[in-house]
Image: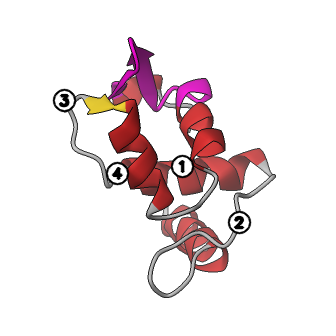
Amino acid sequence: MSDQDQAFKASVIRNFSTADGRLQSIPVQRKKKLIILEYLIFKLEPGRPYPEKEINMFIKGFHEDFATIRREFIVHGFMTRENEVYMLAPQDDWAT
């Protein structure tokens, strides 16, 4: 990743989050939304199953609209869901 790409990602994260890391809003623009989703996903543990209740609580630590963000994780390939259990998808499947 180029220095310019890294700077852009850092700028997006800074513009959409507060000093304590909570999201102020969910970006509408796809490119920025994917950066924010990836920022959150990297805080989860690969290979660990997350029951729906637990993934909701994780997301609520960053933004109240956990249902939208949880759905975005699935839609953009960051996570898979089976029987209300969420797992990180292989990074090759992510829509970044």
Q: Is residue 21 left or right of residue 7?
A: left
* Residue for badge 1: 37
Disc 4 residue type (three-letter): Phe
90 is higher (above) or lower (below) than 35: above
Neighbor class of circle 1 (other Cα within 10 Å; few <14, some 14-19, many 20+) is many
Quadrant in which the C terminus is drawn: top right
Q: Is residue 47 left or right of residue 61?
A: left
Q: Residue at x 80, y 52 (%)?
A: 29
Taking depth in this image into account, of 94 and 28 the one nearest to the observer is: 28
Q: Secondary structure at mark 3?
A: loop
State the image coordinates of residue 49 (x, y, percent, origin top left).
Answer: 23, 28
Q: Secondary structure at mark 4?
A: loop
- Disc 2 vs disc 4: Cβ atoms closer than 8 Å? no
Disc 3 residue type (three-letter): Gly
* Residue for badge 2: 25
- Disc 3 vs disc 1: Cβ atoms closer than 8 Å? no
